[in-house]
Amino acid sequence: MSTATSRLGGLVAAASTLSRRDWLVFVGAAGVLSIGVIAVFAPILAPYPADVAVGDPFEAPSSAHPLGTDDAGHDLLSLLLVGARVSLLVGLLAGSLAVLAGLLVGVTAGVVGGRTETVLMRVVDVVLTLPFLPLVIVAAAVLGPSLATTVGVLVAVMWARPARELRSQVLSIRERTFVRASRSMGASPTYVARHYVVPALLPIAVAQFAKAASSAILLEASLSFLGLGDPTAPSWGTILFYAQQRSAFLTDAWSWWVLPPGVAIGGSVLSFTFLALGIERRTAGDRRAATAVDDGPELTVMPPAPDSAPVLDVTDLTVVYGDDDTAPTAVDDVNLSVGRGETLGVVGESGSGKSSLALALLALLDPPGRVASGSVTLRTDRIDDAGAARSPTMADFRGDAVAFVPQEAMNALDPRRTLREQVVEAVVAHRDCSRERAEDVLTDVGLDAESHGRYPHELSGGMRQRGVIAAALANDPDVLVADEPTTGLDTVTTIRLLDLLESLQARLGFSLVMVTHDLSSVARVADRIAVVRDGRVVEVGETDRLHESPDHPYTNELLGARPTLPSDIGASRGASGDSTAPTDSGSADTGDAHLEYDGVAKSYDGDAVLRGVHLRVSRGESVALVGESGAGKSTLGRMAAGLVTPDEGTVAVEGRSVPSWAATDRTSLGRTVHYLFQDPYASLSPNRTVGCAVREPLDIHDIGEPGDRDARVLDALSDVGLAPAEDYAGRRPTALSGGERQRVAIARAVVLEPAVLVADEPTSMLDAPLRRDLLELLYDLVAARDITLLHVTHDIAAASEFADRLAVLAAGRIVESGPPATLLSTPSHEETRTLVDATRALHAGRSPTAADANAADDIAENAPAEGDEPHAER
């Protein structure tokens, strides 16, 4: 009995949760289902035949006729039930056909693009500009009343809006990294549409169908009421038409003749509308209802205390992912404190739980993540009466007393708004904000006035990160939590950003919690460091002490994994070549060029990114293309895969022009050149298994039999160290760590054994031990398969250890190229010296030598101003 009661209680709780989260879908679906049941079983449910007079004219409602009768003695309840069949049929049929037409036009325009897209969207624009209701009325009047005419007219005027909506979604899907990866592998538009676009559009298409069906029911009722419907097919609209014709509105009969069909029309329209809105909310990933304000740890808020008391105190914090007792633990009983004005570094490898710790502090965990236990004490003077009257939560103080700098600046910023607008938005959530206040904050973080009105895609990586910091500091927080703030930035920009945080902290007095896998960068600014492993804090100590004599072996392991730049690095790799002078030859080889750039130039919106690049890569050679953020490295790499077309000059692979190759036979180009994208989280579809992702290039190029493909996939997974391969093949990318995802991406890159591999910052988001392991794996794989490698990176330390040759890109040109040992020991160009000095300064530790300190100061003072090279992500 108790078990049954418990299960019943669980079902009630689940239903309650469902109704709270998705009440629009629940109510809408219930309404639509009810109408459908009534329409299907109308002949059975109707008490009388709808076309037979069964009572006196204008008979008031009674037990015999619950809704009374019309002027001919027809039972109005029977007419209402039977009329549901026609009204719902028109709505479903017109809505389905309109969405199918819109889906066909929208997907074709979005996937094919070019002239086809232009023509189709101009037709859509013309249809949308036509007066909707008058056009329906005129068309129905000309063609004559019938159900076929009604449906045809409705479809003709309703398809354009779904087409526009679906096309905009296609454009969004088309630009997702995993779709771009598929296209770069040679996938045809049909393949992309079948495997990515259409599955992603189905929920949106259902929402559009619900909207179209509700509009069709309303329009059919309007046409029938005006006498343009089919008089032989009773519908809710024809009931209203005859009521108007028989002057029911002027008598008491309106209450039982007019009101019920009006309520039925309104109820059906609302049901479809609720269903559409609910599906759209779920599709958009709106989790506001799913993430309750008490998903963070228990919060105690106190007024400020003397300097000796911590401003933030974390006690016994535990975070798990799941609802049952077997849910994996990401943060395990963590205790930390942060003093006023102190910088605490939280360091650990990928998957250690450090980001879950940061998100839990701010009550930002996404389901199924949740705080299982623990509490936080916050000392701030921002305690208002509302907060004192109830139990406060971190949501009350997030963005105000406690601010957050997320990991990916490009994803954190709204691409539709300028930096200035986004800073204003961050402030107005808590208080009034003027344009001048936003500009002052942006200026404080080192952004000039010209950049304030720019959009995120127009800024370099460092500038975007400064914008995110400005938005976080706009409300003068007591605590700033920064999650991997320097990930993906070159060493020069990293030093500049760390110095900025130090200067802002000294001036504004906030406490800083810096979460990162980069021990070198956090050691430069942190007063204390907490080392996290497997969700537990294994060591906390003063930065200097921790560097000199760490207590835990894992801390010592992290210290030993930091990149170094010994002068003999790379001496055994390509040492026979000579470093080129800063001409534009960019080549130190004498063999035939396998990949060649000749006079390549590229501009975006009038800003020159590349200015006549010359670079030759021999067959089987590995070349690391290094440079600061915004130098144009990724643009150059994408040209090799045909993803970007040069404005001037030529790009050739195996002597064949890449732009021409991409235009005439992209499938063949994708077989020859593979592009390994930077972000392993975005380059793998979350809806496909690992096995499907690795197998995709084999499917695109139809290589081998299905059984052979599966065997090659398992071999590739084993080659990249994912064992047992069968287990990993069945997982989804969301169940993998960052390092495991990048291994999957590498497996997909080598499973075809392409002739040329372009690896774009493949390890920038990983911690030092993983970074070294992945690079060693990548270089060993390409060497074993004789693959020509262009490694795009800002990490000159890691690149110099593995690459045959370094090519330094600055000011849009290759300024220096040669063996790593030569470039590191005797760099001939200022940009190379800057990169080398910045790397040595960054990895010097908390107590650098005088030479390192001077080098860091010179870098901060003399490095080119950020923003000289916009469109850095390109």
Image: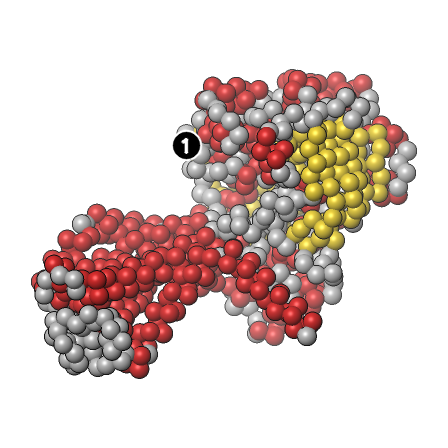
Q: Residue at x 44, y 56 (%)?
A: 24
Q: Position of residue 534 (x, y in %)?
A: 78, 49
User: Would you place residue 846 above or below residue 802 in this image?
Assistant: above
Q: Is residue 644 visible?
A: yes
User: Would you place residue 662 above or below residue 7 in this image?
Assistant: above
Horizontally, residue 300 falls left or right of residue 447, namely right
Q: Residue at x 45, y 22 (%)?
A: 435
User: Would you place residue 64 above or below residue 577 in this image?
Assistant: below
Q: Position of residue 713 (x, y in %)?
A: 64, 65
Q: Position of residue 614 (x, y in %)?
A: 54, 36
Residue closest to the eye, 85 or 612: 85
The quadrant holding residue 335 is: top right
Q: State the residue position of label 1.
A: 605
Indicate the secondary structure of the residue bearing disc 1: loop
For badge 1, the amino acid type reads Asp
Q: Total marks drawn?
A: 1
Residue closest to the eye, 757 or 105: 105
Q: Residue at x 61, y 49 (%)?
A: 366
Q: Residue at x 48, y 38 (%)?
A: 414
